[in-house]
Image (cartoon, rainbow, N blue to C red):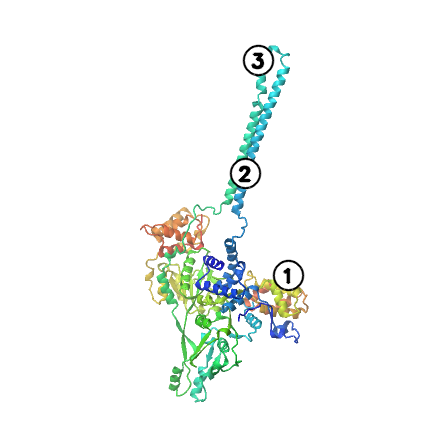
C-alpha cells in the first residue's frame, strides 16, 4: 500500500509512472517477500528509485521527493513551520498584552486605593490640628481642606498614567501584531491566487498539426548498410563478366534531430513555444536531442543537464542528425557585415539545417537572405509551416499571410525598449501606434493585460489569453496573436520595464 | 535460484590470486589489476535487476566504473567471463546476436567451394552466445560454431557497452528480444530461446549522449553513477594504484585537489578529465616527483608538462595551463 501511495505521489511530481511500474513493484515485492526480505517503508527509496528514474536529473530529484513523501504520508512529527511559529508568537503576544493590561489596571486600582487612604488620613490629621489656631477661618477652610484631601488629587493623575500605560501597551501590541502579520505573508503583491488545470494552455498547440509534423519528421530514410545484397551482386557481377561487383543493401533508419532553441531568458515566450512543439514531437516518438543557447549557438546547454557544450562537440556527438534551430538567427551573423560569424563554421557539417524564426515572412530582410544563402532552410514559426515542412510540402510563403509580424524598428532596437529609463514621450506614442497596428486590437489588448504585471510568466500569459475575450467575444488566445506577442522583446527577455 | 549481488569490494583475477605479488602504479594499470568498490545504491539496483530479470541500464561519466561493474558482478556471482558487445554507430540489432559473412558466402559460391553450410559463415556475438549457452548442448549442438559449450546450460553476463552510440533503431529493435531472451537466425532457419532458469544477466551502459527511447527505458532498471567525491576518489586511487599512492600522501591529495579544479564548471573545459585519466596522470607525477609526499608546487614545470595525460584537447590545454599555474602559485 505504501508503494502504491508513493507511486501516486511520484506521478503527481512529474515522473512518467505507468501501469508497468505498479506491476514491476508488485513483482519485486513478491520476490522480496518470498526471500523474506520485504523492505520497511523508509527503505523503499533504494528499491523504487531504479524502477522509476530514467535520467541522472530524475535520480537526483528522487531523493528530495521521497523525503517529502515520507514527511507528508507517514505523518511524522512535523518540524514547526514558519507559519506555525508565527501563529504561536501571535498567541503569545495576545496573551502577554492581556496580562499587561490586567497588571496595569491592578496597579491603577491599588494606587487609587492608596491615594484614597492617604487623603483620608491627611483629612483626619487636618481636622485634629487646625480648629484652635484659626477659628475665624473655619467657614472657608473646610472647603479648601476638602479639595486638598480628595482622593482625586492623586487618583486622577495616576488613573491617567495607568490609561496611558495601557494605551501604550495596546499600541505596541498592535505594531507587533502588524509586523508579524506582514511577516506571515507568503506571496507579496498577489491579491488572488490563480488556479489552472494542467493542459489549460493546450489550445495554443494544434495536436492535429503536430501529429502530422511528427509523422513527417519520423519518416524512415534509407541508408546503405554493410549487408551484401546477394541477388543484386550476382546480377552486377554477371554483367561484368564475372568480375566481382558487390552491391550492398539499403536499410531503413529513423531520422534523428538535433533541436537548438534560442532562449533569451528563463521565461522567453518563443522558447516556451518551441519547447511545446518539441515536447509534442517527442511524445509522438520523434527521435530528438534538445539543447538551448542564448543568442549565439557557439555554446549550448543540454535540456537535461547543466554543462555547456560547444558547437564542435555537438558535431562530434550527432554527426548524422538533422539540425533544427528555433531562433531569429541574430546571433549567427556578424552585425556589421551580415556575414556568418566564424563561430558558425561547425554548423556547416550538417547537410540538413533548418532555422525556425519568430519573424513573419513579410518582415524578412537581409538576415534571412544571408541565412538562406548560407545553406539554411528558413521557416517562419507556426505549427502549420512546421507540419508542412516535415511533410515535404512547399507552402511558398502562403502560410504566412495571416501572421502579423513584429515591426522591424522594434526588432532591431529591442534592447532600447528594455531599458529602465523611459524613452521620450513622442517615441512611446509612436511605439503604441506601431504596436496597435502590428498586433491588431485583440493582440494589443492581450499585451496590455500582460503588461499590468512587470514579470512575464507563461501561465499568466496563457491564462489571460484563455480568459480574456477579444473584440469578437472569443478568447484572445490564437497562435497568430501568440506568435506576434512572442516576437516582442519584453516576452523574450521576460519582463516589462516599469 | 535467486541471484544476489553482495556489493563487496571485488578484485580482478590477477589481484585476488594469492601467489602473485601486488602490483603498484604503472604496473597495476598495465597489469589490468583492479578492485571494484560499488556504491550502496548501485548494489541495490543490481539486485533489483536480478530479481526482476530485467536489464540494468547504467549511466555516468566516462571512468566512473560502468563497464567495470559488469566484471565485478560476474566475478561476484561466478558467471564466468563477461560476454561483451561494443556498440558502434552502425550497429544493428542482429549484430548483438550474430553476424553472417555474406561476402565470404558469395565468394565461396562463386568459386564453387563445396562442403560449406550457412553455419560456416555465422559468428555468434555476445547475447546470441549467452542464449545458446543458456540451453543444453544437446538442444543447440547443430547450430554451434566458434565457441565451446560446456554441455549443461549455464548462465552468463552480457555487457552491452555504450548503447547510446548506436542509431535510434537499435534499442527499439532489441526490446522484445531482451524481454523474451530469444533470437532467430533466418540463414539457419532456426530460433533460440534461453531456458528460464539460466536467463542471461544483461548490463547496458550509456554515456547519456543520446536520449534513449522511452519504451526501452521503461524495460530497464536504471542507475546513474555519479562522479565520486574527493574522499572516495582518494580511496579508489589508492586501491587501484597500490601502496605507492597512500590516501593521505601529499602527492595524492594535491593531485586530486588539482584534478577537481580542472573538472570545475568555472573552468568549463570541453572534455572534463575522468578517473582513468587521473590514474595515468598520477603515475606520471609519481614517476617525476619520486615520492608520495612531494609537493606539486616544488616543480611546476613537471606538472605543466604532464598535463597532456589528463587534458586531451588543445583549447582545453591552453585554458587548463593558466588555471594550473595559478593553482600552483597559491599552493606555494
Separation of residues labelled 2 and 3 (CA atoms): 52 Å
Task: Give x and y (percent) for residue A476.
Answer: 35, 52
Outermost residue on the left side: it is: A472
Nearer to us: label 3 or label 1 = 3
Q: Chain of mark 2?
A: A
| Most foreground residue, A129 or A279 | A129
| Most foreground residue, B258 or B112 | B112
Q: Earlier in the sequence, mark 2 or mark 3?
A: 2
Element under disc 3: loop
Separation of residues labelled 3 and 1 (CA atoms): 102 Å
Q: Answer left or right for A274 relative to A40.
A: left
Residue B160 in view in this figure = no
Q: How many residues crowd mark 3 within 10 Å: few (<14), some (14–19), many (20+)?
A: few
Q: Which label was assigned to residue B137?
A: none
Q: Disc 3 marks which residue?
A: A140
The total number of labels drawn is: 3
Q: How many residues crowd mark 2 within 10 Å: few (<14), some (14–19), many (20+)?
A: few
Q: Which label was assigned to residue A95?
A: 2
Q: Answer left or right for A408 relative to B26.
A: left
Q: Are marks 3 and 1 in contact (CB under 8 Å)?
A: no
Outermost residue on the top side: it is: A136
Residue A66 in view in this figure = yes
Q: Disc 1 marks which residue?
A: B329
| Most foreground residue, A498 or A211 | A211
Task: Give x and y (percent) for residue B27.
Answer: 63, 74
Task: Give x and y (percent) for residue B292.
Answer: 67, 67
Q: Residue at x 57, y 21 (%)?
A: A150
Q: How many residues crowd mark 1 within 10 Å: few (<14), some (14–19), many (20+)?
A: few
Q: Chain of mark 3?
A: A
Task: Give x and y (percent) for residue B118.
Answer: 44, 84
Amino acid at each position: 500500500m505504501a508503494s502504491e501511495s508513493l507511486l501516486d505521489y511520484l506521478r503527481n511530481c512529474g515522473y512518467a509512472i505507468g501501469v508497468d511500474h505498479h506491476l514491476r513493484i508488485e513483482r519485486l515485492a513478491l520476490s522480496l517477500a518470498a526471500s523474506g526480505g520485504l523492505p520497511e517503508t523508509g527503505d523503499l527509496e533504494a528499491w523504487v528509485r531504479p524502477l522509476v528514474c530514467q535520467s541522472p536529473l530524475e535520480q537526483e530529484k528522487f531523493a528530495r521527493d521521497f523525503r517529502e513523501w515520507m514527511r507528508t504520508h507517514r505523518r511524522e512529527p512535523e518540524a514547526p513551520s514558519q507559519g506555525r511559529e508565527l501563529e504561536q508568537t501571535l498567541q503569545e503576544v495576545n496573551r502577554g498584552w492581556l496580562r499587561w493590561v490586567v497588571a496595569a489596571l491592578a496597579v491603577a486600582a491599588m494606587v487609587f486605593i492608596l491615594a484614597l487612604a492617604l487623603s483620608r488620613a491627611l483629612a483626619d490629621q487636618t481636622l485634629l490640628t487646625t480648629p484652635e489656631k484659626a477659628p475665624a477661618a473655619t467657614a472657608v477652610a473646610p472647603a479648601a481642606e476638602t479639595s486638598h484631601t480628595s482622593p482625586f488629587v492623586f487618583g486622577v493623575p495616576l488613573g491617567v498614567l495607568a490609561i496611558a500605560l495601557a494605551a501604550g501597551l495596546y499600541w505596541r501590541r498592535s505594531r507587533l501584531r502588524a509586523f508579524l502579520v506582514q511577516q506571515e505573508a507568503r506571496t507579496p503583491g498577489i491579491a488572488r491566487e490563480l488556479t489552472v488545470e494542467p493542459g489549460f494552455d493546450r489550445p495554443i498547440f494544434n495536436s492535429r498539426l503536430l501529429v502530422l509534423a511528427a509523422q513527417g519528421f519520423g519518416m524512415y530514410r534509407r541508408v546503405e548498410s554493410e549487408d551484401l545484397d546477394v541477388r543484386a551482386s550476382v546480377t552486377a557481377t554477371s554483367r561484368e563478366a564475372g568480375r566481382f561487383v558487390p552491391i550492398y543493401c539499403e536499410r531503413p533508419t529513423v531520422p534523428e534531430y538535433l533541436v537548438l532553441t534560442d532562449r533569451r531568458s528563463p521565461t522567453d515566450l518563443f522558447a516556451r513555444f518551441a519547447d511545446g512543439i518539441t515536447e509534442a514531437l517527442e511524445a509522438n516518438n520523434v527521435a530528438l536531442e534538445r539543447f538551448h543557447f542564448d543568442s549565439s549557438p557557439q555554446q549550448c546547454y543540454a535540456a537535461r543537464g547543466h554543462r555547456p557544450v560547444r558547437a564542435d562537440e555537438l558535431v562530434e556527438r550527432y554527426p548524422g542528425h538533422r539540425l533544427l534551430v528555433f531562433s531569429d538567427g541574430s546571433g549567427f551573423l556578424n552585425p556589421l557585415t551580415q556575414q556568418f560569424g566564424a563561430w558558425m563554421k561547425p554548423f556547416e557539417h550538417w547537410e540538413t539545417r533548418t532555422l525556425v524564426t519568430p519573424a513573419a515572412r513579410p518582415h524578412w530582410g537581409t538576415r534571412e537572405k544571408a541565412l538562406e544563402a548560407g545553406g539554411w532552410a528558413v521557416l517562419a514559426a507556426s505549427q502549420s509551416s512546421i507540419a508542412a515542412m516535415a511533410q515535404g510540402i512547399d507552402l511558398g510563403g502562403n502560410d504566412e499571410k495571416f501572421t502579423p509580424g513584429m515591426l522591424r524598428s522594434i526588432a532591431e532596437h529591442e534592447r532600447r525598449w528594455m531599458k529602465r529609463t523611459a524613452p521620450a514621450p513622442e517615441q512611446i506614442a509612436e511605439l503604441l501606434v506601431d504596436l496597435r497596428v502590428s498586433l491588431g486590437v485583440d493582440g494589443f489588448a492581450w499585451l496590455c493585460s500582460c503588461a499590468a504585471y512587470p514579470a512575464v510568466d507563461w501561465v499568466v500569459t496563457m491564462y489571460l489569453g484563455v480568459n480574456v475575450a477579444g473584440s469578437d467575444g472569443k478568447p484572445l488566445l490564437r497562435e497568430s496573436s501568440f506568435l506576434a506577442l512572442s516576437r516582442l522583446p519584453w516576452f523574450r527577455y521576460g519582463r516589462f520595464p516599469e | 535460484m535467486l541471484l544476489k549481488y553482495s556489493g563487496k569490494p571485488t578484485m580482478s583475477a590477477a589481484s585476488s590470486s594469492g601467489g602473485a605479488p601486488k602490483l603498484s602504479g604503472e604496473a597495476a594499470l598495465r597489469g589490468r589489476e583492479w578492485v571494484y568498490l560499488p556504491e550502496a545504491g548501485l548494489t541495490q539496483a543490481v539486485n533489483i535487476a536480478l530479481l526482476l530479470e530485467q536489464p540494468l541500464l547504467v549511466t555516468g561519466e566516462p571512468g566512473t566504473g560502468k563497464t567495470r561493474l559488469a566484471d565485478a558482478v560476474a566475478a561476484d556471482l561466478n558467471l564466468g567471463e563477461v560476454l561483451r558487445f561494443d556498440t558502434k554507430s552502425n550497429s544493428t540489432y542482429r549484430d548483438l546476436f550474430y553476424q553472417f559473412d555474406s561476402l565470404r558466402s558469395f565468394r565461396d559460391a562463386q568459386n564453387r567451394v563445396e562442403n560449406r553450410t550457412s553455419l560456416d559463415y555465422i559468428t555468434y556475438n555476445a547475447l546470441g552466445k549467452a542464449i545458446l549457452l543458456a540451453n543444453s548442448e544437446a538442444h543447440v549442438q547443430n547450430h554451434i560454431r566458434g565457441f565451446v559449450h560446456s554441455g549443461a546450460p549455464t548462465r552468463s553476463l552480457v555487457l552491452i557497452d555504450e548503447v547510446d552510440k548506436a542509431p535510434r533503431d537499435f534499442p527499439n529493435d532489441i526490446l522484445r528480444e531482451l524481454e523474451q531472451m530469444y533470437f532467430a537466425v533466418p540463414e539457419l532457419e532456426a530460433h533460440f530461446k534461453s531456458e528460464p532458469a539460466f536467463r542471461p544477466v544483461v548490463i547496458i551502459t550509456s554515456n547519456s549522449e543520446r536520449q534513449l527511447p522511452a519504451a526501452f527505458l521503461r524495460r530497464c532498471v536504471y542507475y546513474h553513477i555519479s562522479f565520486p567525491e574527493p574522499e572516495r576518489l582518494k580511496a579508489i586511487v589508492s586501491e587501484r594504484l597500490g601502496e605507492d599512492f597512500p590516501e593521505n600522501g601529499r602527492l595524492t591529495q594535491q593531485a586530486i585537489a588539482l584534478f577537481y579544479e580542472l573538472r570545475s564548471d568555472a573552468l568549463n573545459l570541453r572534455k572534463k578529465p575522468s578517473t582513468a585519466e587521473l590514474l595515468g596522470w598520477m603515475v606520471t607525477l609519481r614517476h617525476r616527483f619520486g615520492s608520495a609526499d612531494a609537493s606539486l608546487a616544488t616543480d611546476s614545470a613537471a606538472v605543466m608538462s604532464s598535463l597532456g595525460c589528463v587534458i586531451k584537447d588543445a583549447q582545453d590545454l591552453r585554458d587548463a595551463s593558466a588555471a594550473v599555474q595559478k593553482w600552483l602559485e597559491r599552493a606555494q
